[in-house]
Amino acid sequence: MPETTNPPEVSSLSFEDALAELDAIVRKLEGGQSRLEEAIADYERGAALRRHCEAKLAEAEGKVQAIVAGPDGAATGLRDMG
């Protein structure tokens, strides 16, 4: 029986690493070749990765908003990039 390694704790992953792992899980689940127990575990890991990515994005958005607002809370002159 092959030895399995535990994946790293989700909270220790960078946004990019978490997103890459989430993408791999989605592709694996879409393939439909996993056993039920494995698919459930992958789905649970994927849900945790999604929450982690959302939190990292919210944190980054807050930092950008703080930069745009400047130290005195007034806009720094950056225009809407959208």
Image (cartoon, rainbow, N blue to C red):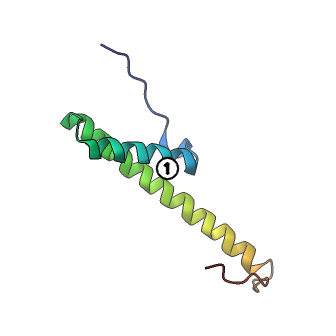
Q: Count the marks: how many?
A: 1
Q: Is residue 79 above or below residue 14?
A: below
User: Toward the viewer: 51 or 17?
Assistant: 17
Asked which secondary structure carries label 1, the reply is helix
In which quarter of the view is residue 81 placed? bottom right
Left or right position of 31 against 50: left
Q: Quadrant of the N terminus?
A: top left
Position of residue 22 measured from the top left corner of the image (x, y, whole percent) = 42, 47
Q: What residue is shown at x 68% (from left), y 67% (from top)?
A: 63
User: Toward the viewer: 61 or 27?
Assistant: 27
Left or right position of 21 against 36: right
Left or right position of 15 against 76: left
In which quarter of the view is residue 41 placed? top left
In this view, the residue farthest toward the left is 36
Position of residue 54 measured from the top left corner of the image (x, y, whole percent) = 49, 60
For badge 1, the amino acid type reads: Leu
Q: What residue is shown at x 61% (from left), y 69% (from top)?
A: 61
Q: What residue is shown at x 56% (from left), y 58% (from top)?
A: 56
In this view, the residue farthest toward the front is 31
Name the residue beneath numbered marker 1.
Answer: 19
Q: Is residue 8 above or below residue 60?
A: above
Position of residue 50 measured from the top left corner of the image (x, y, whole percent) = 43, 54
Position of residue 72 measured from the top left corner of the image (x, y, whole percent) = 80, 82
Characterize the local packing of mark 1: few (<14), some (14-19) or many (20 or more) Cα atoms within 10 angstroms.
some
In which quarter of the view is residue 34 placed? top left
Q: Quadrant of the C terminus?
A: bottom right
